[in-house]
Amino acid sequence: VAVPAHPARLRERGYNQAREIARHAARRCGLPLLRRAVIRQRATPAQTALDAATRRRNLRGAFAVPLAARKRIAGRCLAIIDDVMTTGSTVDELAGTLKQAGAERIEIWVVARAPHRE
């Protein structure tokens, strides 16, 4: 499951870097890629200049699992794929959303881990 971009951010950037990484990783590992399993239902400001507590507040309720995707998530082991993890706020919020939708286990796969300075 790639960390979803909000539609406005997707239009601005032209692509979702996490989805591109997930697409290649899924193909390389021979794993299915769950498309549209989760949506970013609310635009959130860029996280780069925010402290950890503000990042958590910024992301609260940002993700949702569409009803049609719940069957594909229930009881599964899923990997959340993102480009960079700093505080972990994004993947924590997304993991909680997927667990509420019935995912059994969540792994976090990121390309890079950035140091976070408060």
Image (cartoon, helix red, strand yellow):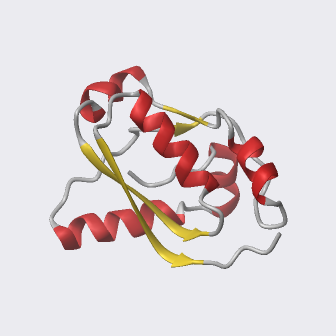
Front residue of 21 and 56: 56
Residue drawn at x 38%, y 51% is 1
Residue drawn at x 55%, y 62% is 15
Number of marks present in the image shown:
0
Tell me residue 7's x, y (percent).
Answer: 62, 44
Above or below for 4 versus 37 = below
Tell me residue 40's x, y (percent).
Answer: 59, 40
Q: Which image quadrant is residue 46 in? A: bottom right
Q: Is residue 31 left or right of residue 42?
A: left
Q: Please identify the residue farthest to the left as the structure is shown.
A: 30
Residue drawn at x 49%, y 38% is 96
Q: Is residue 10 left or right of residue 47?
A: left
Above or below for 62 versus 113 = above
Q: Is residue 2 left or right of residue 41?
A: left
Residue drawn at x 52%, y 38% is 39
Tell me residue 16's x, y (percent).
Answer: 54, 60
Tell me residue 85's x, y (percent).
Answer: 58, 68
Q: Please identify the residue farthest to the top as the structure is shown.
A: 67
Front residue of 106 and 66: 106
Q: Quadrant of the C terminus?
A: bottom right
